[in-house]
Amino acid sequence: DVKVTQSSRYLVKRTGEKVFLECVQDMDHENMFWYRQDPGLGLRLIYFSYDVKMKEKGDIPEGYSVSREKKERFSLILESASTNQTSMYLCASSLAGWNEQFFGPGTRLTVL
Amino acid sequence: AQKVTQAQTEISVVEKEDVTLDCVYETRDTTYYLFWYKQPPSGELVFLIRRNSFDEQNEISGRYSWNFQKSTSSFNFTITASQVVDSAVYFCALSEWGSQGNLIFGKGTKLSVKP
């Protein structure tokens, strides 16, 4: 079974802090994705990566950056956390192209 | 532009009732994929089905069935004889040929199945 793990289920940070959210997949998938999920807005794509060291902006990249130094790991970085970044963050991976995405359990981030 | 609409925000049914979740999509591509995901209260999205645009055959998997109609740009999901464990938020999603597999999600339908 594909396993996508995220470093924390719950995280509380203060405004202005630098925040790292880590995601690891164990099935040698090419593609990895970061979404945020907010009530009434559904899932929105922040960034994605289709290869090591490659990254592409999604629909809402502002205030975020990513890093993919190894194929299995995709990190989401909030350079200076703000309260409007309080959200559920979901990581996903897929084999390639249009295969189904497999999701991690999510990280609920609260920025105070 | 691509778009997925799930008009039903919340649905509540009593156990053993049948329920259909609607999904309407917009795309200019002739090649695309449609998906359904389930998000139970635990939070993790679970993949249910993927359909490509060239395969309009309906799919049945146990109590779940999907009706794909290109003529109406719809990909509806029916649960037969619903159970309490079906309570979840269900998302429909679209991936276009040129998108490198990116998913455009609908806003989800929250299904509550009461005993």
Image (tube, helix red, strand yellow):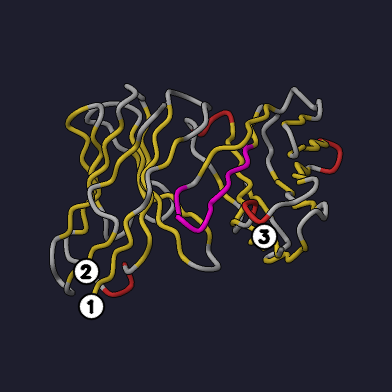
Tell me whether circle 1 and circle 2 mark residues in contact (CB < 8 Å).
yes
Residues in magenta, as a range: B35-44
| Number of other residues with Cα within 10 Å of mark 2, as a class: few under 14, some 14 to 19, many 20 or more | few
- Disc 3: which residue: B111
> Which element type, helix, strand or loop, lies under badge 1?
loop
Is residue B104 highlighted in magenta? no
Please identify the residue farthest to the bottom as the structure is shown.
Answer: A112
Q: Amino acid at mark 2?
A: Val
* Label 1 vs 2, first from the N-terminus: 2
Please identify the residue farthest to the right as the structure is shown.
Answer: B71
Tell me whether circle 1 and circle 3 mark residues in contact (CB < 8 Å).
no
Mark 1, chain letter? A
Q: Nearer the viewer, residue A82 or B80?
A: B80
Q: Position of residue A95 (x, y in %)?
A: 42, 23
Residue B66 relative to residue A31: left or right: right
Q: Quadrant of the C terminus of chain A?
A: bottom left
Q: Amino acid at mark 1?
A: Leu
Cα–Cα span, label 1 and label 3: 32 Å
- Disc 2: which residue: A12
- Disc 1: which residue: A112
Viewer-side label of 2, 3: 3
